[in-house]
Amino acid sequence: MNNLSQSVHVHNELRARLLREFPDLHEDEAALIDTLEGISDLNDAIVAVWESAADDDAMCAAIDDRIKTMKERFDRICLRSQRKRAIIQEAMEEAGIKKIESAVVTLSIRNNPAKVIITDDALIPEQFHKVKTIESIDIAAIKEAMKDGQVVPGATLSNGSQSLAARVK
């Protein structure tokens, strides 16, 4: 870019000098342009910068393609990892194994707490609604009430599920 700035400066100086020394060039713009092209490297400098920009565009396109490819690969690997963990959990559950300890990891099957499942918002009593900027149902209050044996119309407790926990050593 420095070369371009320098070329513009030289071009402008040459133009001014030509117009001073050959005043007739004021009326013949084509001759002035042709003369400047012959004695100035500004056009070549501009084309060189354009070619560099085109190279950058190609590099951007290639990097964008690479990012998309890597994102697809990332997604595949994450899905593969999730599937492997599910297979481990299924195998341990099927075999009745609650915990495996090794030199690198401790795997254990743990019970997840029950979650509130709202089956009908309209049936949830007002005492379980929180007022914020907008009204929402207080899931935590419903869960606590249901744990205490209270029946909450419009809500039930799910059965707890299990998940795999891994502690890396």
Image: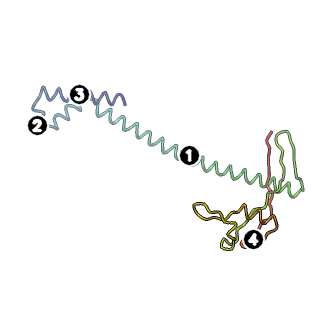
Q: 77 left or right of 46?
A: right
Name the residue: 83% across, 54% down.
Answer: 110
How far apart marks 3 and 1 lie (CA) works out to: 45 Å
User: Whole-percent x and y of residue 115?
Assistant: 75, 62
| Residue 39, numbered label | 3
Residue 60 pos. (x, y %): 48, 43
3D distance between C-alphas at marks 2 and 3:
20 Å
CA distance separating discs 1 and 2: 55 Å
Q: Which three-letter amino acid code belongs to the residue tagged 3?
A: Ile
Give whichever of 38, 88 is nearer the camera: 88
- Compute the Cα span from label 2 to label 4: 93 Å
Residue at 9% from the left image edge and 32% from the top image edge: 24
Sequence-wise first label, 4 or 1: 1
Mark nearer the viewer, 4 or 1: 4
Q: Which secondary structure, mark 4? A: loop
What residue would you read off at disc 4? Answer: 152
Residue 88 position within the rendered picture, expressed as x and y whole percent measured from the top left: 81, 52
Name the kind of residue labelled 4 in the image.
Answer: Val
Closer to viewer: mark 4 or mark 3: 4
Q: Where on the picture, by quarter, is residue 6?
A: top left
At label 4, counting other C-alpha atoms closer than 10 Å, the crowd grade (few under 14, some 14-19, many 20 or more) is some
Residue 35 vs residue 77: left or right?
left
Residue underneath mark 1: 67
Looking at marks 2 and 4 on the same chain, the residue that comes earlier in the sequence is marked by: 2
Residue type at mark 1: give it.
Answer: Ile
Which residue carries the number 2 mark? 27
* Structural distance between the alpha carbons of marks 4 and 1: 49 Å
Q: How is the image coloured?
A: rainbow
Point out the image quarter for the N terminus.
Answer: top left
